[in-house]
Image (cartoon, grey):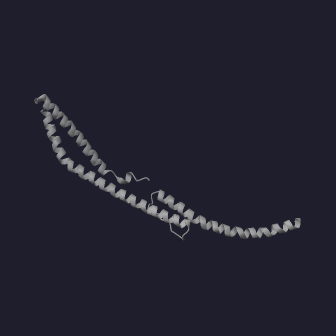
Amino acid sequence: VEAMVEAAKRGADPGLAIAVIPALLAARSVLRPVRDMRRAAQRLGSGRFDTRIEVRGSDELAGLARTFNETAGALEQSVDELREAEVRARRFASDVSHELRTPLAGMLAVTEVLDEEAERLDPDTAAALRLVSAETGKLAVLVEDLMEISRFDPRAAELHL
């Protein structure tokens, strides 16, 4: 009996080795696309929106790769559109603030001159003048803030998704 067990062991070792090699090759061929997808997902997550996966075959992994590529393409397009909208918004803020500065400078000059004469005005007119002067000053601060926003460096605040 022991001789038969020993013979079976000796016969099983080469058979097991022969069976393990194809199993390892099959596992490697299945895991390679999964590793590629993991690396691609990491690149996409780090902001490389042009990342795509090579689609091989027509199995479930190929379908997953196609879906990944479609999603990455849609994300890339959305990010591009957001960046373009940000440029347009910045340009709009700059244009509006520039257009407001000239009339605002005139208003500030007039209210400053009138403020010097406020003591000679009747109380109601003087109060109205102080209100107009204060609100014109607030508007000037808002316009300067808008100018500052339009100059903000867009690279300083990258889009984090």
Numbered-mark total: 0
| Residue placed most toward the observer, 72 or 155 | 72
* 5 up-or-down from 155: above or below: below
Residue placed furthest toward the top: 123
| Residue placed most toward the observer, 39 or 151 | 39
Judge from the rendering whether residue 45 lies leftward or rightward of residue 19; answer left or right: left
* 50 up-or-down from 138: above or below: below
Q: Position of residue 27 (x, y in %)?
A: 63, 65
* 36 up-or-down from 154: above or below: below
Residue name at image x 53 percent, y 61 percent? 39
| Residue placed most toward the observer, 26 or 147 | 26
Judge from the rendering whether residue 76 lies leftward or rightward of residue 61; answer left or right: left
Judge from the rendering whether residue 13 lies leftward or rightward of residue 113; answer left or right: right
* 35 up-or-down from 141: above or below: below
Q: Position of residue 106 (x, y in %)?
A: 15, 44
Residue name at image x 42 percent, y 61 percent? 74
Q: Position of residue 88 (x, y in %)?
A: 30, 56
**Residue 73's quadrant in the figure?**
bottom left
Residue name at image x 24 percent, y 53 percent? 95
Residue name at image x 85 percent, y 66 percent? 6
What is the quadrant of the N terminus in the image?
bottom right
Q: Position of residue 110 (x, y in %)?
A: 14, 40
